[in-house]
Amino acid sequence: MKSLSGKSGERSKILRKEDLPRLRRKTRREGKTIAFANGCFDLLHVGHIRYLQGAREAADLLVVGVNDDASVRLLKGPSRPVMPLEERLEILSALEPVDYLVPFSGRQPLDVIEVLKPDFQCKGTDYTPEGVPEREVVERHGGRVLIVGDPKDHSTTDLLGKMRRPTPPRRGVKRER
């Protein structure tokens, strides 16, 4: 396991795929359930927070898969990610709903799900249960797909677009030069 801060005795939230079978065994022994959520989390916004809160409410533990930099570029384009994986992991690790993080490569975290075997695969409201790409793998291992979070009214792409557009001056307010 990788430590974020390097402080001795502090439990790192960042796991490797190889750590997941041990976490699964420990969780089952304790009679607890695991929810899995995933995404790029490139520029954190309120939609991400609500998604993670909803996913955390589904189970005793929340494991979040985070796309590595190459997979973010593949999914979002050459100008992304805005923040490198290490920074995204550090920010997400500070969030209360998140118990563990696991970086992954590729479009979908199928290899992570195969190893973790979560009780619940949580996706945002831009999906339907039938449209979740990982559904077959989750259900094969006895898990269920859940749709969580608020309506998809927020996106990093839209937020970046707003930041790039100049804002028109407001009436009665002089612009500084």
Image (cartoon, rainbow, N blue to C red):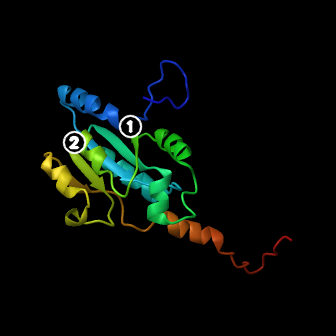
Q: Position of residue 160 (x, y in %)?
A: 58, 66
Examine the rendered structure and indicate whether residue 176 appears above or below residue 18: below
Of the numbered discs in the image, which one, if any, rests on residue 117? 2
Of the numbered discs in the image, which one, if any, rests on residue 100? 1
Q: Position of residue 119 (x, y in %)?
A: 20, 44
Which residue is farthest right?
Answer: 177
Q: Earlier in the sequence, mark 2 or mark 1?
A: 1
Q: CA distance from mark 2 to mark 1?
A: 15 Å
Residue sitting at 56 percent across and 44 percent down?
Answer: 87
Of the numbered discs in the image, which one, if any, rests on residue 82? none
Residue sitting at 73 percent across and 78 percent down?
Answer: 169
* Type of amino acid at the residue the image marks with label 2: Lys
Quadrant (top left/top right/bottom left/bottom right) for the C terminus: bottom right
Q: In terms of depth relative to the viewer, which is nearer, 73 or 169?
A: 73
Quadrant (top left/top right/bottom left/bottom right) for the N terminus: top left
Residue sitting at 30 percent across and 34 percent down?
Answer: 20
Q: Position of residue 108 (x, y in %)?
A: 33, 55
Q: In terms of depth relative to the viewer, which is nearer, 93 or 112?
A: 112
Q: Position of residue 82 (x, y in %)?
A: 58, 57
- Horizontally, residue 153 falls left or right of residue 149, namely right
* Type of amino acid at the residue the image marks with label 1: Tyr
Q: Secondary structure at mark 1?
A: strand
- Horizontally, residue 45 falls left or right of residue 136, namely right
Nearest to the eye among marks 2 and 1: give it: 2
Say few, some or many: other residues with alpha carbon within 10 Å of mark 2 (under 14 / 14 to 19 / 20 or more): many
The answer to whether residue 56 of the structure is visible from this angle is yes
Q: Secondary structure at mark 2?
A: loop
